[in-house]
Amino acid sequence: MVREQSSLPEKGSPILRLRHVSKNFGAVSALTDIELDVHAGEVVALVGDNGAGKSTLVKVLAGVHQPSSGSIEFCGQEVSLDNPSRALELGIATVFQDLALCENLDVVANLFLGHEMSPWNLDEVAMEVRAWTLLRELAARIPSVREPIASLSGGQRQTVAIARSLLLDPKIIMLDEPTAALGVAQTAEVLNLIERVRERGLGVIIISHNMEDVRAVADRVVVLRLGRNNGVFSPDASNQELVAAITGATENSVSRRLDRKSNQNNEIGGRPA
């Protein structure tokens, strides 16, 4: 695989544009008329209920599935993402939820796994130096690059998977549920890492069911419902707005519970001392 080398676009400039993208599996419409923009130095969160089309959209962008119709522009050029190798060549990296790490190998081996025949042709010492350099740039909390993956925490494993995707100098990185099943400290570690990636000028797409995590790092929140766009929100949009867009209902048990909690807080705050 030959990586297409070019500098990152200027921060704020568009990297990825989807227009009227649809994906059908036989008679089933998984995505319908999807539109999406991602800019350099921006984190875009994809949220939606199960079956909303989030994973299908990520797989289209990763080259796993090909769209049935619509256009995809990357850095101003219309492209065809025919396979995962093509997506990587262009600069679209994906970290799926399973991370695809080898637990019996150390951090260095996992970072460079699959790159043995790459043009780098690095020896063991050079790979270790490159690994340490990248992890330091990301402010990663990993004690040693010689630690086996099996001994690392969930947050540290996520860090290794993200760092591995950065070795090919992508312009966009997609993260599928990066904080799922992580504790509070590990979640904070991963969210900090996402901010470091954004600071490098990359576009970041995250899929998450955790609204607190989304609010912490996202610049925009894109809601999908039943395979369609159902709103673009700022991270400080109310829970009621987001829940309504995700569920398609203006009022439900979740929104009523949030309203009660908000009213209770207002009453407590308004009591005289």
Image: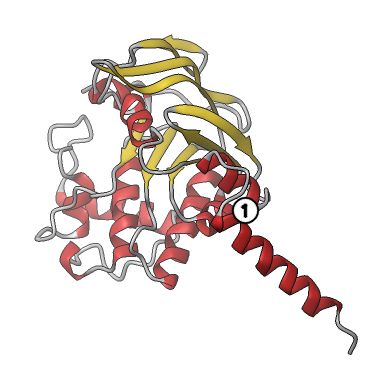
- Residue 116 position, x and y percent, is 13, 38
Label 1 sits on a secondary structure element that is: helix
Q: Residue at x 72, y 73 (%)?
A: 264
Reading the image, the residue beneath label 1 is 239
Q: Residue at x 32, y 67 (%)?
A: 142
Mark 1 crowdedness (10 Å alpha carbons): few <14, some 14-19, many ≥20: some
Q: Is residue 44 above or below residue 77?
A: below
- Residue 29 position, x and y percent, is 34, 20
In the image as oriented, which residue stretches furthest toward the bottom? 273
Asked if one can make out residue 57 in the rendered structure from this viewpoint, the answer is: yes
Q: Is residue 15 above or below residue 68?
A: below
Determine which quarter of the picture holds residue 179.
Answer: bottom left
Determine which quarter of the picture holds residue 159.
Answer: bottom left
Left or right: residue 202 versus residue 177 is right
Instruction: Quarter of the image for the C terminus: give it.
Output: bottom right
Q: Residue at x 74, y 68 (%)?
A: 263
Instruction: Quarter of the image for the N terminus: give it.
Output: top left
Left or right: residue 99 versus residue 260 is left
Q: Is residue 24 above or below residue 221?
A: above
